[in-house]
Amino acid sequence: MPLVKNGRIATDAFVHVADDAPLPADGAVLISAARFLEDTEALLRRVGKTGVIWPNNRDLDDLVPHLDRLAMVVLVFPSFRDGRAYSQARLLRERYGYKSELRATGQVLRDQFVFMLRAGFDAFEVKKESDAEAFTNTARRYSVFYQPTGDGRVTALHQRMALRHSESASR
Amino acid sequence: MYAYDELDRTLINERVSEFRDQVKRRLSGELTEDEFKMLRLQNGVYLQLHAYMFRVAIPYGTLSSKQLRRLAHVARRHDRGYGHFTTRQNIQFNWIKLAELPDALADLAEVGIHAMQTSGNNTRNVTSDQWAGVAPGEIEDPRIWSELLRQYTTLHPEFSFLPRKFKFAITASAHDRAAIKVHDIGLRLHKNAEGQTGFEVLVGGGLGRTPFIGKTIKPFVLGRDLLSYVEAILRVYNQYGRRDNIYKARIKILVHELGIEKFAKEVEEEWLQIRDGALTLDDADVEEVRSRFSYPTYEKLPHMPEELKKAAHDPDFERWRKNSVSPHKAPGYAIVTLSLKPVGGPPGDATADQMDAIADLADQYSFGEIRVGHEQNLALPHVARRDLPVLWKALDKIGVATPNVNLVSDIIACPGLDYCSLANARSIPIAQELTRRFANHDTANLIGRLHINISGCINACGHHHVGHIGILGVEKNGEEFYQITIGGRADEDAEVGTLIGPAVKYGEVADVIEDIVEAYLALRARPDELFVDTVKRLGVEPFRERVYATR
């Protein structure tokens, strides 16, 4: 699956380590939530970055205390029909102030890019090569947004009000 | 009317171009049918028995004459010359070609109409009282809030892949014409003891195979908090709603399984975290939306103009006026309901020619505005009473002046097995036969208000659970059978109807309904005791006896 990061196809710096595989001494690793919670302190003491795959049916409470020491959180879309990770993403960004990489994985298709960007994702393991290549154009597809989210895009309502304000100011 | 500006138009056009790309990718095979299915559903496109069906939103039931003409154009150009108005203020076209859909959408986008989220597991068209803004005694125009909700729910980045579909309805009148108690979220505008305006919020209503009447989750939410409170509900539902079983995925099941107190507590906790965030609506925000609604400038007109006095001698006119004309908040004006339930016709259908003619009449007599109600009828919301006689003649000429509004032949029905791939049985021919049985207006008038609702399957698109008489088509050994319920209602006293006994065969349905109505006429305490009140007083037993004694 191609990885899209900062708007372009990138190589993955993280090595996905299976639950029963030994941890490499250094380098960036990606591990499951279960393994992370089993031995959190030892993992975070390692030299090298840590990323965690957090399932979409698990509350974020156990993850939140460690957020500032994580280099990446991966949220899962087992099917593109399952939208739970959008809520997790917004909570991580908007409520818990998580700043590092937030990656979407699973059935990630081009038709979800805009929603994901708005929810706070900044990296995407895209299912199809053609969708990954279309990322930049797809991400630009919409220029008008009705809802305020943590991505900072100005809503249509506030654009209108700003326009009205500037019109009345220049009068 | 809400006037779209450049921003609204841009968004709709961007959606059309996205859908054009999705159709192209499907036609080229780049998208599998499974992947495309969700995408087309999110844009109102179903695959039915014979063809694709295309469902277009009419937010809160308000249409301009220009928009109605464009719907007529789509019916003529891309369909078979007619459209079907649904119970959720949408219009459906039944014969559209996939390759033509993007063009049809582009045609509609030019007049500010879209099909976004008219199906799929997302927030659907926000519906409201079809008399919003003109009904006497309304708290305020609920469409301001409907429009705020329309914008808030359109392409929501967090809630476009919910466990299941999600429907809002909103009313601001004591008499609920929007059926808010059978919606996922029902909103009732009212004033609290301090005189502030806000919302009673109901949650977990819905029909389908497990009908529930919505429960009050919070008796009073200020307008400023409406969106944050709704977001809290949706967030709890998105995370905890069931995704393992499509039939248990609606919010009504979550509310039922958790219990309303526990669910309300979860929502409250979430809401306290976000209530003072970016979704807070200050007065200026609400004013901004309010300012985009335009209202007619009413003339000072007499309540009883000469034209009306003269026409009162015509019994046909009087019959129609008494049935289809309702009081308006402005003196000298009236709300006129256009019956889309002609004797022998499929409920809720309008031809392209009728739509064009109605658009012209709206321009002439109703400030260019048309409304669509959940009962599958249309309304002209601002008619000067002096124009009623001439308008009546024109409406009668095009077949939309049948004086049967709210009477036994004003039937709500889903498309049924004639169109729908989910249906087990036909709905439309049952409705047609019943309108013939009750074609005599004097009889229908004698019977009084009586709502019959017909669904061709358990999904309940015809809202049979809340019909005064509900008819549900089922299939037994390859044959169409119908279960009959009585005593349901969809208004402020909403209730789910009670089954009267074993299902009956297709050919027996009309006879059974006639028996039920005859039993009612014999049983009612007074001529003005409505059918549904007689059922409430006596229960189903006397009706059951009457129907099954001889069968």
Image (cartoon, grey):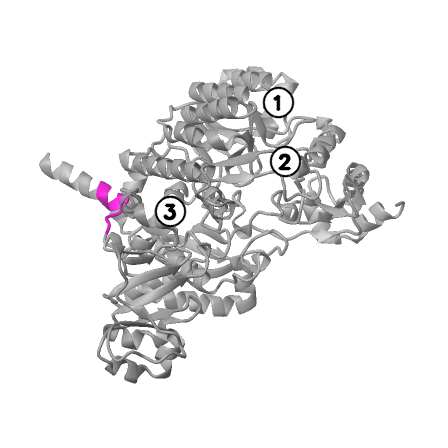
Q: Name which of mark 3 and mark 1 comes first in the sequence.
A: 3
Q: CA distance from mark 2 to mark 1?
A: 37 Å
Determine whether the residue tagged by mark 3 lies in a helix, strand or loop. Answer: loop
User: Circle 3 sits on which residue?
Assistant: B155
A133 within the magenta span: no
* Image: magenta residue range: A153-160
Confirm whether residue B305 shows in the render.
Answer: yes
Which of the image's four quarters has the N terminus of chain A? Answer: bottom left
- Residue at figure coordinates x 79%, y 52% from the top left: B501
Residues tagged by mark 3 and mark 1 found on one chain of the structure: yes
Q: Name which of mark 2 and mark 3 comes first in the sequence.
A: 3
Looking at numbered disc 1 in the image, what kind of residue is underneath it? Answer: Glu
- Residue at figure coordinates x 57%, y 60% from the top left: B245
Residue B199 placement (x, y as % from top left) = 42, 53
User: Circle 1 sits on which residue?
Assistant: B318
Q: Residues within 10 Å of mark 3 (few under 14, many from 20)?
A: many
- Read off the chain for label 1: B
Residue B538 placement (x, y as % from top left) = 75, 53
Determine whether the residue tagged by mark 1 lies in a helix, strand or loop. Answer: helix
- Read off the chain for label 2: B
A157 within the magenta span: yes
Looking at numbered disc 2 in the image, what kind of residue is underneath it? Answer: Tyr
- Residue at figure coordinates x 19%, y 39% from the top left: A164
